[in-house]
Structure formats: C-alpha cells, structure tokens
Image (spheres, rainbow, N blue to C red):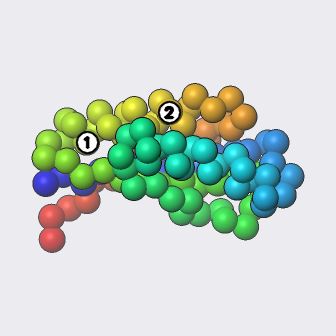
Amino acid sequence: MHVLALRMDLRLPGAHSLKEKRAQITPIVEGARRRHRVAAAEVGAQDAHHRAVLGFATVSGSARHAGEVLDAVERFVWSFPEIEVLGSERTWAEDA
C-alpha cells in the first residue's frame, strides 16, 4: 500500500473576505475529490483572506499510480487562473 499526500500553498489575490476565499477554494477542493477521487481539505491558513493551504491524499497499490494521481491533481489546481500557487510539497506515509 502506498499513501502519498500533497500540500499546496496558495495565494488568492481576489479574495477580500473569508466568504470570497471559500468561493474560490471550494471548486478546487470539490473538483479534485470528484475528478481524481482523492481526499481533499483546506489544511492551513483558514483565517487568512489571501492565503490557503490545501491538502490532498491518495492511496494506491503502486507508488507510480499514486504519483500520477497527484500529478493530475497538481495540474488541476494550477488550471485555476484566479489563484497563485506559491509552493507544493509531497510526503509519502511510512508503514506503521
């Protein structure tokens, strides 16, 4: 079993309130869940209007497939012109 997590740090220049921020990140989180069948959530900077940290995770039988899924998720996030990706980081979960 291979578990891979992706953390993406985003800047939302058009969001002037938390309500506007949620309106921008909800399509990203829900779209990633629906299209790529990953776990997705806002995992940081919840109280900041112009920033968001999103987390995505996938479980697969092969490391290659897990990487391909999160490659697709990362491209999906980059496809939103109203956001700016400041950084991304991948982490493999270790067997317990």
| Mark carried by residue 49 | none
| Residue bearing the label numbered 2 | 76
Residue at position x 19%, y 35% in the image: 64
Residue at position x 42%, y 38% in the image: 35
Asked whether disc 1 touches disc 2, contact meaning CB atoms under 8 Å apart, the reply is no
Q: Is residue 56 left or right of residue 30?
A: left
The answer to whether 73 is drawn above or below residue 15 in the figure is: above
The answer to whether 28 is drawn above or below residue 40 in the figure is: above
- Of pointers 1 and 2, the one earlier in the residue sequence: 1
Amino acid on which disc 1 is placed: Ala
| Quarter of the picture holding the C terminus | bottom left
What element does badge 2 sit on? helix
What element does badge 1 sit on? helix
How many marks do you count on the picture?
A: 2
Outermost residue toward the front? Answer: 34
Amino acid on which disc 2 is placed: Phe
